[in-house]
Image (cartoon, rainbow, N blue to C red):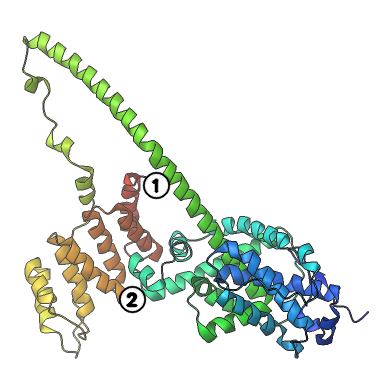
Amino acid sequence: MSSEPNESETTNGLQTVHPSSFKVGSWKSADPEQERAFIGYYLPRLRMLMLARLEAHADVDAQVQQVLLDSLRALRKGQLRIADKLTHFVLGIARIHLNQHNHLEKSTDTGAKPVGELPELSQAKAKAEETRQMGMAEKAIQCLDPVDLQILTLTLVEGVKSVNLARRLSLSPDTVRQRKLRAAKRIEESFSAQLEEAAEQTPTDEKPRACNGEPAQELGLAYLEGVLRGDDLERFEDHTFDCALCHKEVSSLIAVREKLRHQAAQAAVTKTKSKSIWPLLAAAVVLVLLLVAAFVGWQRHSANANKAGGESPAQAYPLPSEEHAQSGAAALAQMADLSLPVYIAPAPTKEKVNLHFLRGMNAYNSGDCDKADKELSLVLPPSPHSNTANFYDAVCLLHMSKSDDAFAKLSLVIAEGETPEKESALYELAQVELTRNHLPQAHNVLVQIIALDGEHEARARVEDAKLLPLITPKN
């Protein structure tokens, strides 16, 4: 029994066997069973590679098919000399196609023996597996923390890089990295739980190896972002091609990415339709309200004229009160907490205290924000007090209605990373956004504060509860 590969059935319906079972010399004889097993093993891996690396998904099927054809033709010509190098051999051909796919012409080599198995093992079954994974991805997305989901969406759908992402969400780069790792872990756990719930025992097509899936969890998102380069990229692809667990986890991340993109596309279509219908509805509503108002006004005018013997229009229609005329924007600004946080000086140490910092904080504690701002703005790095000075200076600027300057100062504090002032800076940043009437931005910052589960969580929840009803859903 012997010379034939030991085959097993995979979840996508293709028969596969680990490449170490293939015999170098048998490729020249074009053994159909071995070539079938070769396609079954490498087809899903090549699809994963192409989906991760190609922007135009319409090119994926053609590229996978061509790599399989070129690989088999090269094997039949005896170009592989060492059996253990088969994966690197296939990956090398795939990378050539990736680097040249916009210019590569279809092969016109008619000397190679036609590969009859490729039409039979077309990518329909692999694509059916991807469709199933999309359903699993939807459940995985529902398990994610809202902030983690926002980070994933900005990363995988909008293509926002980590540095800009940290700045946009007012988080430190390290926090963004940690949240990405946590999101990747939760996605893997959700997929595993769903497979376990479905009582699926998928036979492994790998020989045992010491890998717990950490490479894919740590670098999978970076791989999809296109951040990995050079040797790091090649090492990661070499590993995921040969590791069943990491291959599965990267495929799960790809499924989540495709699901998020699909949801974003649907939301965009819905929003476009809503925009096209809304002007007509709005015009109709305004017309009805005008007619009703005119009718009610006429009735009141007639009644008042009958009672008072005829009053002037100014008397019949009094101007709205100042309270009634107050705009929603001003009402939102009033939600902001503009109280000055209490500053408690630390216990004296041998370290010399910056004189400007000392004067600024004395002015701050006296309620003199103008003087505090002048002194604290002079406390610059490398002073150990510069971050604290920036925070309290920002609070003073906000108190003096200089919201843009306060925003800039708070951004500097938050950019410092995990400092004692970070959570308080985020809370003050939310107040800045409220004073500037930036509702979605204020909500995003409040969500971050709630996720930190710190001393400002309770106040952030109260503010966010008041804010949410005022945000018009964007459908």
Q: Which mark is residue 332?
A: none
**Residue 130: percent from left, percent from top:** 65, 60
**Residue 385: percent from left, percent from top:** 20, 81
* Quadrant position of residue 190: bottom right
Query: Where 9 sits versus 21, above or below?
Result: above
Crowdedness of circle 1 by 10 Å Cα count: few (<14), some, many (20+)?
few
**Residue 103: percent from left, percent from top:** 56, 73
Q: CA distance from mark 1 to mark 2?
A: 32 Å
Left or right of residue 114: residue 430: left
Residue shown at 58% from the left, 72% from the top: 101
Query: Could you tell me which secondary element the residue under label 2 belongs to?
Result: loop
Regarding residue 207, the answer to whether it shows in the image is no
Give the residue type that dot 1 points to.
Lys
Crowdedness of circle 2 by 10 Å Cα count: few (<14), some, many (20+)?
some
Label pair 1/2, CB-CB below 8 angstroms: no
Mark 1 sits on what residue? 474
**Residue 295: percent from left, percent from top:** 23, 17
Mark 2 sits on what residue? 417
Regarding residue 158, the answer to whether it shows in the image is yes
Query: Where 237 sits versus 203, above or below?
Result: below
Query: Where 279 sits versus 15, above or below?
Result: above
Q: Quadrant of the N terminus?
A: bottom right
Q: Nearer the viewer, mark 1 or mark 2?
A: 1
Query: Could you tell me which secondary element the residue under label 1 belongs to?
Result: loop
Left or right of residue 206: residue 309: left
Q: Nearer the viewer, residue 408 or 226?
A: 226
Q: Quadrant of the C terminus?
A: top left
Q: Nearer the viewer, residue 161 or 110?
A: 110
Give the residue type that dot 2 points to.
Gly
Residue shown at 85% from the left, 73% from the top: 33
